[in-house]
Image (cartoon, rainbow, N blue to C red):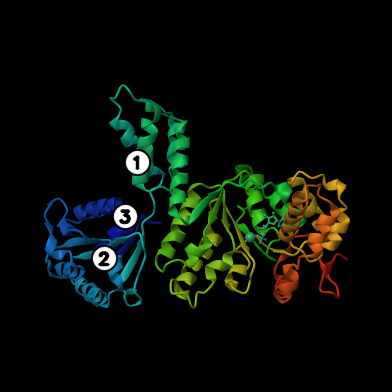
Amino acid sequence: MATAQEQMDVLIRSRYSILYVVSWEEDRVEKTLAEIAKRQEKKLFTWAITRGFIETGEGQSDPSTTDPLRALDFVMESDDSALFALLDFDPFLDDPVVERKLRDVAHALKASYKTLVIVSPVLKIPDHLEKDFTVIDYKLPGLEELGAQLDGIIAQVADNPNIKIELDEQGREHIVKAALGLTLSEAENVFAKALVTNSRLDMGDVEIVLAEKEQIIRKSGILEFYSAEEQFAEIGGLDSLKDWLKKRGKAFTEAAREFGLPEPKGCLLIGVQGCGKSLSAKAVAGLWKLPLLRLDVGSVFGGVVGSSEQNMRRAIRLSESIAPCILWLDELEKGFAGTQSSSFSDAGTTARVFGSFITWLQEKTVPVFVIATANDVTALPPELMRKGRFDEIFFVDLPSAPEREDIFRIHLTKRHRDADSFDLEALARASAGFSGAEIEQAVISALYDAFDQDRKLTQEDLLNNLHNTVPLSETRKEDIDALREWAQNRARAASVHAVEEVATGRKIEL
Ligand SMILES: Nc1ncnc2c1ncn2[C@@H]1O[C@H](COP(=O)(O)OP(=O)(O)O)[C@@H](O)[C@H]1O
Ligand SMILES: [Mg+2]
């Protein structure tokens, strides 16, 4: 595929009048435009709200053009063969007058050697202009460009006796690779920082680059590095799911590829609230020893119109840049909540962002394992559940009796109690219909009771708390039944034991 630079060159020569370049990297885009202008013997004008148009290399800005409409007049009236780059122009695209004017520009420029280029990190195209704009997704710099950047910085300090460069070819490659996912100026900063820190550049600086990337990921506000403390052994029950995940632990290696295994895509965990979906996502990161990135579903899918698409692209690229890793989308339904009514989002944007996510999920070749969870299937787009999206869809039901024993054991042990000194079977019986989270809460409440009375935790404390709790499975019985119904032929059971219903509405193990 052609690079964004090559694409732009061709589009400009073939008289596309308005290009929309999506990028954070104004400097880099401007540099590309300058190169294209030079090659095509055109002038380059750049506009910013603060100073109006300025011709590159001329240094004279035209303050009369700071007004966006005047800026468009300037483009129309100029009789040069030229490129006109508009920075920060996207806020004005909402104005119907600007919109109309842009349509006129689009039309007029076809018969000229002029091209308008809107450069913005945010993709925002008014419906009426969709046909007049050509969108270019300006990719983050690749290995080659980052490598050249690093070499440039090294060359600058080559004569400085106080700075030591102890980097062989392999070390250089590691540092450059670690910088993938950063913009060129972010990379420049971090390379400089690595150099200045202890006045040397060596293999150890990979850590500095990675730490910087972690910072940038945090700042992005859409992805979060989740340092998972949860252990796989802390998941009670869910044996099928655990087996499936265990088997895929080595699937990201070169050896797995050679063996003929495909790269795992990911799994979708659907089920009753509080039964261990999020817990499993966190614990698997520890099991596989891979970094866990949590994607803020609400802000990516249901975010402010326009920036959602950009957020999604950035999230995907950042996750790819630290692959192999796990990308965790918790409570996916939240991204689709209120798409009809919310004033901050619209169904069209959500559907588009979601569409690009689905495409990526299906086609990705980098080892980013996606774990998505959902408590409510009714809010999810059905396309998500189609074959080939995820490797597997699991249904996480309420725990069965032996699983509840397991869960009691885990939570008692976690709180320094000897689980064997309790009658776990009786506890499991008394907690029919309880979720893992509710069992955990009962254990904690019982501990409060005992602590308050300054004595040891007893079986009775636990039983009392169970009896005093009405589990969600009773208050939300219809929802859970509907979910089970849905899951029957569409999802694989996460557990090897089935939970059965009895006349009382409580669930018991058969
Ligand atoms: N199967 C389980 N084994 C052990 N603890 C569980 C289990 N299910 C839920 N819990 C407890 O309840 C908490 C909340 O569960 P979580 O995984 O967040 O539920 P959800 O399925 O809604 O994502 C967990 O952090 C854990 O302490
Ligand atoms: Mg959860």
Amino acid tagged 3: Gln
Residue that mark 1 sits on? 188
Residue at x 19%, y 52% (from the top left corner): 38
Quarter of the picture containing the C terminus is bottom right
Residue 97's tag is none
Residue at x 63%, y 51% (from the top left corner): 282
**Above-or-below relation of 167 to 496:** above
Residue 14's tag is 2
Q: CA distance from mark 1 to mark 2?
A: 34 Å
Report the image quarter containing ligand 1. bottom right
Mark toward the start of the polypeptide (2 vs 3): 3
Residue 18: x %, y % from top left? 27, 67
Residue 341: x %, y % from top left? 48, 78
Between 62 and 462, the residue placed more toward the observer is 462
SS for tag 3?
helix
Residue 5's tag is 3
Residue at x 64%, y 57% (from the top left corner): 278
Classify mark 1: residues with Cα within 10 Å, few (<14), some (14-19) or many (20+): some
Amino acid tagged 2: Ser
SS for tag 2?
loop
Q: CA distance from mark 2 to mark 3?
A: 14 Å
* Residue 94: quarter of image: bottom left
Mark toward the start of the polypeptide (1 vs 2): 2
Count of numbered badges drawn on the protein: 3
Q: CA distance from mark 1 to mark 3?
A: 20 Å
**Above-or-below relation of 160 to 233:** above
